[in-house]
Image (tube, helix red, strand yellow):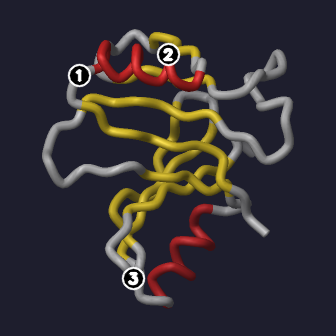
């Protein structure tokens, strides 16, 4: 079974959203060098930034660019190429093909049969 490993949430005001999630849930935020994208730590992590608690995930906030944006989950898979083929055969639409993310791994996006946008993550090989 493939697991959810990350979330993205669009926000209209980054500082207001940060304060909200920090005050309500105790989340921490890290800058990324881009003011429109902040990493959200929702659970303690190890030295490799992997959540210590099984089943827990961390995510990010990003500045909303259009009113149609909504939260997105990311699912870790063994081979993005294989999963993109399965997705297309099952009626999904590819939005972003396999894309390297620095030396961290690979990312892709698809739209499912219910019009949700979902991310795929593959660790580097």
**Vertical placement of 98 versus 54: above or below?**
below
Q: Earlier in the sequence, mark 1 or mark 3?
A: 1
How packed mark 2 is, by other alpha carbons closer than 10 Å (few <14, some 14-19, many 20 or more), is few
**Vertical placement of 29 versus 66: above or below?**
above
Task: Give the secondary structure at mark 2.
Answer: helix
Q: Say which of marks 3 and 2 sits in front.
A: 2
Instruction: Identify the image quadrant of residue 42.
Output: top right
Per the model, the C-alpha gap separating discs 2 and 1 is 15 Å
Task: Give the secondary structure at mark 1.
Answer: loop
Task: Give the secondary structure at mark 3.
Answer: loop
Looking at the image, residue 25 sits to the left or right of residue 77; the answer is left
Look at the numbered discs 3 and 2 and tell me whether their residues touch, using CB distance below 8 Å. no
Per the model, the C-alpha gap separating discs 1 and 3 is 31 Å
Which residue does the numbered mark 2 point to in the structure image?
A: 23
Residue at figure coordinates x 14%, y 48% from the top left: 67
Residue at figure coordinates x 40%, y 30% from the top left: 61
Residue 113, labelled with which disc?
Answer: 3
Question: Quick one: which residue is furthest to the front in this view?
Answer: 24
Task: Please state, as top left, top right, bottom left or bottom right, where the C terminus lies in the image.
Answer: top right
x and y percentages locating residue 114 in the rendered image: 37, 79
x and y percentages locating residue 96 in the rendered image: 37, 57
Q: Say which of marks 1 and 3 sits in front.
A: 1
Which residue does the numbered mark 1 point to in the structure image?
A: 13
Look at the numbered discs 1 and 3 and tell me whether their residues touch, using CB distance below 8 Å. no
Q: Nearer the viewer, residue 125 or 92?
A: 92
Q: Say which of marks 2 and 1 sits in front.
A: 2
Look at the numbered discs 2 and 1 and tell me whether their residues touch, using CB distance below 8 Å. no
């Amino acid at each position: 079974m493939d697991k959810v490993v990350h979330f993205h949430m669009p926000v209209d005001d980054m500082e207001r959203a940060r304060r909200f999630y920090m005050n309500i849930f105790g989340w921490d935020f890290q800058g990324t060098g881009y003011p429109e994208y902040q990493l959200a730590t929702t659970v303690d992590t190890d030295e490799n930034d992997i959540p210590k608690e099984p089943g827990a995930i961390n995510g990010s906030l990003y500045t909303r660019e259009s009113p149609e944006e909504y939260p997105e989950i990311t699912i870790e898979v063994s081979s993005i190429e294989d999963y993109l083929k399965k997705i297309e055969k099952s009626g999904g639409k590819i939005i972003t093909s396999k894309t390297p993310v620095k030396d961290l791994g690979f990312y892709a996006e698809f739209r499912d049969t219910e019009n949700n946008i979902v991310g795929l993550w593959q660790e580097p090989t």
